[in-house]
Amino acid sequence: MTELTLQNHRRTMWHFIPGLALSAVITGVALWGGAIPAVAGAGFSALTLAILLGMVIGNTVYPQIWKQCDGGVLFAKQHLLRLGIILYGFRLTFSQIADVGISGIVIDVLTLSSTFMLACFLGQKVFGLDRHTSWLIGAGSSICGAAAVLATEP
């Protein structure tokens, strides 16, 4: 019984490898491209390049390889992206927060909250979007843009 469970576990792990490898290649190319001075000078960050590469691959190659890559790509999108955003937040130190002071923190919280609520309200009431889409737009507008939208998408 244990042998069968171990075999299933190995099979499940191998299911993630192609998609994780594809995600790693896209990440590596985007980081490399974003470090090129001419590319960075044109306003293209690694995040922008990763989104563009994902769009190109998603509309050209991915439809042929999605069965092999889907598990790892979904894992990267649902877990690794969120972990990356959390770790990115750790770059903010307590001394930086203390330098801003309580008034800066209150202003930041109010700005973030009001932007999120306004985006949700406008999305649902004015533009007729569903609640979930409005939340995605609110998260992207108030927090950090595309990475927040991708992280909050189910």
Image: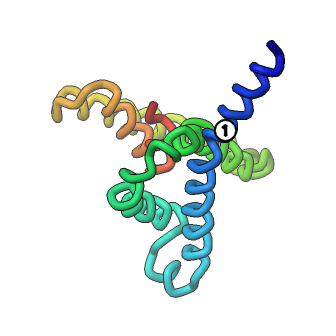
Q: Residue furthest right?
A: 2
Tag 1 secondary structure: helix
| Rendering coords of residue 41 (x, y %) | 49, 82
- Compared with 104, 57 (above or below) is below
Which quadrant holds the N terminus?
Answer: top right
Q: Quick one: quadrant of the C terminus? A: top left
- Is 149 drawn above or below residue 117 in the view shown? below
| Residue pictured at 62% horizontal, 58% vertical | 24
The answer to whether residue 114 is left or right of residue 125 is right
Q: Is residue 20 visible?
A: yes
Picture quadrant where residue 13 is located: top right
Looking at this view, is 19 or 50 the one in front? 19
Q: Dividing the picture into quarters, in which one does residue 4 lie?
A: top right
> Left or right: 154 with respect to 18?
left
Label 1 Cα neighbours within 10 Å, binned few <14 / some 14-19 / many ≥20 = few
Which residue lies at the image location 77% right of the left edge and 49% below the top edge? Answer: 93
Q: Say if residue 106 shows up in the picture.
A: no
> Residue 24 or 127: which is nearer the viewer?
24
Q: Nearer the viewer, residue 123 or 117?
A: 123
Amino acid carrying mark 1 in the image: Ile
Q: Position of residue 30 (x, y in %)?
A: 55, 68
Q: Residue 80, position in %: x, y? A: 63, 43
The spot of residue 3 in percent (x, y) is 82, 21
Task: Tell me the residue that label 1 is attached to.
Answer: 102
Q: Residue furthest bottom?
A: 38
What residue do we see at 83% from left, 16% from top?
Answer: 2
User: How many numbered discs?
Assistant: 1
At x 41%, y 64%, the residue is 52
Q: Which picture quadrant has residue 15?
A: top right
